[in-house]
Amino acid sequence: MPYLGAVADDFTGATDLATMLVARGFRTVVAVGSGGLVDSQADAVVVALKSRTAPVADAVRDSVAALDALRAAGCERFYFKYCSTFDSTPEGNIGPVADALLDALGETRTVVVPAFPATGRTVYRARLFVHDDLLDESPMRDHPLTPMRDSHLGRLLSPQTRRRVHFIGHDTVRAGASHIRTALNAPEADGALTVVDATTDADLRAIAAATADLRLVTGAAGLALGLTGPHPGSARALARPADPRFGVVLSGSASAATRAQVAHARPALPHRRLDPVALRRDFEGAVADLVGFVTASWHEDPDRPPLIYSTGPGDDLGADLGPDANLDGDLGPDAKLDAALVERALARCAADLVAAGAHHLLVAGGETSGAVVTALGARTLRIGAEISPGVTWSRTEARLNGRCLPINIALKSGNFGETDIFTTAWDKLS
């Protein structure tokens, strides 16, 4: 019976956390949505939601439903997983979901720990850094869905929550777990969301030790570094299926990291870029053309995975998203339309390609990953070989037209992965 239950606000974040939990000795399963969580062999269950950019009321509803399902499955301790770049808007959804989960558990306080030093995310004096840049000076400043224009977590969080926002600084963290625990037990931390500085893995381990008595913690996957599961060394790499061929990369991310990965992969892989104009004009025909391109590429060389991508190297992001996009303010209607269209097209491509024989899918982008997994009808993801920090292969079954088709799938956050990930990830399956 699982002990630890986690609610993740997107699918790449769910596999990111699950990878960390497996490495820490938890037999872990990722559940798609809050249905079907019973798994007597799992020590931890991560519920993957598509709630990061959903309307606040929907995000709260789905997160509380996931919590209820985890409690019913036997979980006693809980983890609200969000992105290490604190992707959000002034309205939410991080603050409202944290508030709702605390209320549902009858708890009054928790921590806010988005730091993940292994991927370059650190928090110092309550300010979030992406590698050497403050959050609002990093590429996240111009994220098409959640542009981050402030690096101070207190200023980001305060408009979202009805609780006070409290802070624990780096000097206290470096003093060790007992000092952190004392600060968390202080009267000013009661009833608050407490932002905790962290710049190293050692800081995260100290925070985890200090918060062992909290029923709910919130943060990125890095906080799981300090957890210890009952089965150390339980991680297992996935075996290849009988036919190791027929992979595909589906990239819906517009992040700078993913565009660099596309640039690296294009000389090595057959590639085709999505055309929003063609999709708007004839969606079915445009998707069929993409699927035909991939299957024809497999016929020529089944060991070389084709790449389908939405945004490429050197693109002007505003132009790529649509003529009304304004990255200094709200995105225009064409930008949002194209983003939804790309997501729907890649999800449809995934389903059609798996039906046509795809065995391995590497999907880039949190929103795209959620759409793809949902379109495939997958119910659980079993974590396998790690590709890079925060990215892993998983084993699942696609349920399409009454058929159960086993596949390997990797869900990559737009900001994660080395530049060569689209060409080297396949080596991890062997």
Image: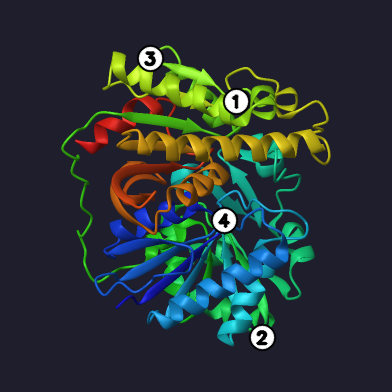
Of badges 4 and 3, nearer the viewer stands 4
Whole-angstrom CA distance, mark 1 to mark 4, is 21 Å
Identify the residue at the far front of this view: 401
Q: Secondary structure at mark 2?
A: helix
Determine the CA span between mark 2 and mark 3: 59 Å
- Residue 292, quarter of the rendered image: top left
Task: Decide: is 271 above or below 407.
Answer: above
Q: Which residue is mark 1?
A: 311
**Circle 2 crowding by C-alpha within 10 Å: few under 14, some 14–19, many from 20:** few
Query: For the residues carrying marks 2 and 1, which lies nearer the camera in this image?
Result: 1
Are discs 4 and 2 less than 8 Å apart at CB? Answer: no
Circle 1 — which element? loop
Residue 255 visible in the shown view? yes
Which residue is labeled 4 in the image?
50
Q: Which mark is residue 268?
A: 3
Amino acid tagged 2: Pro
Among the two numbered marks 2 and 1 on one chain, the one whose residue lies closer to the N terminus: 2
**Which sits earlier in the primary sequence, circle 4 or circle 2?**
4
Percent across and percent down for residue 187 are: 66, 85
